[in-house]
Amino acid sequence: MSGFSAIRPGTDLPRYARDLLRMHDAVIGGGRSQLAPRDVVARSWTRVLRAGLDPDASNLRDPLPLEEVERRRRASPLQGVIEDLRQVITAVADASALLLVVTDSDGIILWRDGSARVRHHADGLGFTEGAEWTESRVGTNAIGTALAEAAPVQLFSAEHFEQAQHPWYCTASPIHDPRTGDLLGIVDVSGPALTLHPTITALVETGVRLAESQLWRRHEQRLERLRTVAAPLLASTSGPVLLVDDNGWVAHASGISTDRIAVPRNAKTLTVPRLGLCIPEQIGDGWLVRPAGKDTRLRMTLDLSGPPTIEVSGADNDWRSALTSRHSEILQLLHRHGRTGLTAAELSNAVYGDAEHIVTVRAEVSRLRRVLGAVVETKPYRLSDSVELQITGRV
């Protein structure tokens, strides 16, 4: 069995389905089974049983109203690639009796296409537009388990938690924004269990790769449009300058070579390697980023006399914001360690008492940078040379 496939080539599907059914009844019932569930299935069943779901019932579906489904479709970046997915997958839907399902990152089904006969059976299962197919709602299923595991998942027959889903197979894979890495949703192919073919995993993988490549192509087209809009201003601008989109991807660079910078925020300073302190200027759907000047300093005051607040001034830019206690603690640590800074592991140790929270530390620093602007440098984490931090009201 390769990849995330639930079956091997040549598997006797009817016999394997019967074996899985006996295993499901035994394991879910708290007994023993000669056939053990796959690791991914065992982990999911454990989560679902802890959530208190009933394997003998059709757990709550309660689809969203059509208006909300339409709103989510319009807001989803997958709106622009759904036709590409349909061309790849539903071209064989009628002949192969399968269903293409695409959800958002919440597991809400936004699009569903494929064999009319299979769609009819899916209706009876509540496998419809607007339904939430997470593990906490409908038990172990490829969509919900792929969300929980952050990985592709294929399930066959009684590997599903609910008995009503046993006549099905489902194959799901997360799809990400190639620019940001953010989860956009899940691509799923489902159908009658006894029609499962080993090539279904390859079909889903192909669909995901195509969709993500199309999303990247559309990103490049947006950068080209941004360059066109900004061309007159760029022609009259001298010195180092960057033109970037809302995610920090560089559409044009002069005097500096880089593909991406920290995400610009309105009225928030940021530091750019080799440019120093910069003030982003919004232009169209992007930002013009230029050095604020060699002598420009950013003065920050962390006030701890009450709930933590930060006051920022400099480069004709003054503002104030509340901070969380965690962000205040991180700022104080960075201030204390000066230009030496702290690695992610060292910051994890300082904040949490161990080096096991590196991912959490990185997420917290990322959120802090969204509040302050990109004045916290990385590798190691430290305050930018352009920043003067003063701490007042410290207990």
Image (spheres, rainbow, N blue to C red):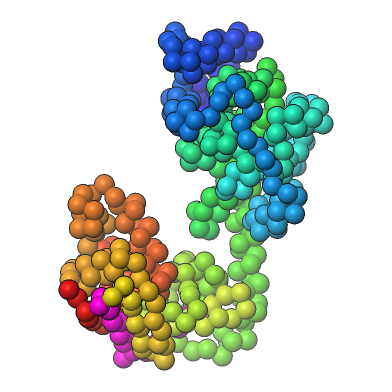
Q: What range of the chain is rendered magenta?
A: 288-305
Tell me, yes or no, if residue 40 can be seen here.
no
In the image, taking residue 190 as reference, residue 139 lies left or right, namely left
Residue at x-position 65% and y-position 52%: 78
Given residues 266 and 246, the one toward you in this image is 266
Tell me, yes or no, if residue 53 can be seen here.
yes
- Residue 298 in the magenta stretch? The answer is yes
Residue at x-position 57% and y-position 47%: 106
In the image, taking residue 173 as reference, residue 76 lies left or right, namely right
- Residue 331 in the magenta stretch? The answer is no
Residue at x-position 45% and y-position 24%: 42
For the image, the number of numbered tags is: 0
Q: Position of residue 206 (x, y in %)?
A: 62, 39
Q: Is residue 70 above or below residue 136?
A: below
Which quadrant is the C terminus positioned in? bottom left
Q: Position of residue 304 (x, y in %)?
A: 25, 75
In the image, taking residue 89 as reference, residue 39 lies left or right, namely left
Q: Is residue 99 above or below residue 391?
A: above
Given residues 273 and 378, the one toward you in this image is 378
Residue at x-position 50% and y-position 79%: 266
Q: Position of residue 72 (x, y in %)?
A: 67, 54
Given residues 112 and 256, the one toward you in this image is 112
In the orientation shown, which residue stands out farthest toward the right?
116
Q: Is residue 388 above or below residue 373?
A: below
